[in-house]
Image (cartoon, rainbow, N blue to C red):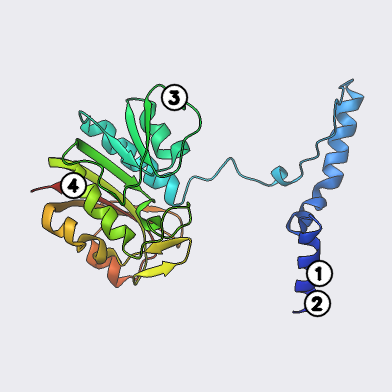
Amino acid sequence: MGVRRAIKTALSLAGVNYRSWGNYRHLPRYLRHRSEWLTQGGVISKSAMVLGNYTSTAGKASGHYFHQDLLVASFVNERKPERHIDVGSRIDGFVAHVASFREIEVFDFQPLPLKAHPNIVFTQADLMNDAGTEITDSLSCLHALEHFGLGRYNDPIDVNGHIKGVANLVRMVKPGGVFYLGVPISDRDEVRFNSERAFHPESVVNFEPIKSHMTLQRFDYVDDADGGLVVNADIKSTVAKRIKGCGIYTFIKTA
């Protein structure tokens, strides 16, 4: 282990965040602002020095969850399905977006301790097991399938967890219904144990339950290269470019 790495490790173990040291270049500005506050008669109840926001931006408007969650929520809003069920998507992202304008039922392996919102109906369930047949005309599973069977969320280890999950998800959708699926994509199928799987873009459409019962209506993706959203993309073009990011598939159940 190099000296620099050893120092960083020691600091981390001591609870010191060395990555924030660069923010101390803003200390003179903080002290100047503090002096101005006190000069104006301001009262400081407790010091809570924050230096990093002097050069921060208004927020992050890019990346997988930002684009995926907004895009699919807009699809649900446009289609206005009779019933929408979500499996494992982000509660404070996609689920919250949809709950702002309609009821959404959420199935997730992990518990949701509190009553989140009147429009969120929660059921704890393992979608590697059967969850019902033709029970909804609209279903989403965004950035969740890739975790099935890896044990990250205390779920049972199952090498074929994602395949079982896909079969159960497809089974839940009524003929003519819509299935929105968001997963990490890469230039090859990968297992990044125990974090996630990533899929070749064409592997997803060739999963047997999808190939037999679904038709791809549209494909969008978020490109890891710049965090931007590419809409109505061509899968073969995506493969040729060896894109890595988040694939967002919209399927219609045909049989």
**Dot placed on the residue nearer the N-terminal end, 3 or 1:** 1
Q: Where is residue 36 in the image (x, y as percent from the top left)?
A: 87, 30
Q: Report the Cα–Cα distance between label 1 and label 2.
A: 6 Å
How far is the residue under mark 3 from the one under mark 4?
Answer: 28 Å
Residue named by callout 4: 171
The kind of secondary structure element at disc 1 is: helix
User: Circle 3 sits on which residue?
Assistant: 117
Q: Which amino acid does label 3 sit on?
A: His
Query: Would you say the residues marked 2 and 3 are in contact, meaning their CB atoms lie under 8 Å apart?
Result: no
| Camera-nearest label, 2 or 3 | 3
Q: What element carries label 4?
A: helix
Q: Distance between the residues labelled 3 and 1?
A: 46 Å
Image disc number at residue 3: 2
Q: Toward the viewer: 61 or 127? A: 127
Which one is in front in this view, the residue at disc 3 or the one at disc 1? Answer: 3
**What residue type is disc 4 on?**
Arg
Using the image, tell me which numbered label, if any, was put on residue 7.
1
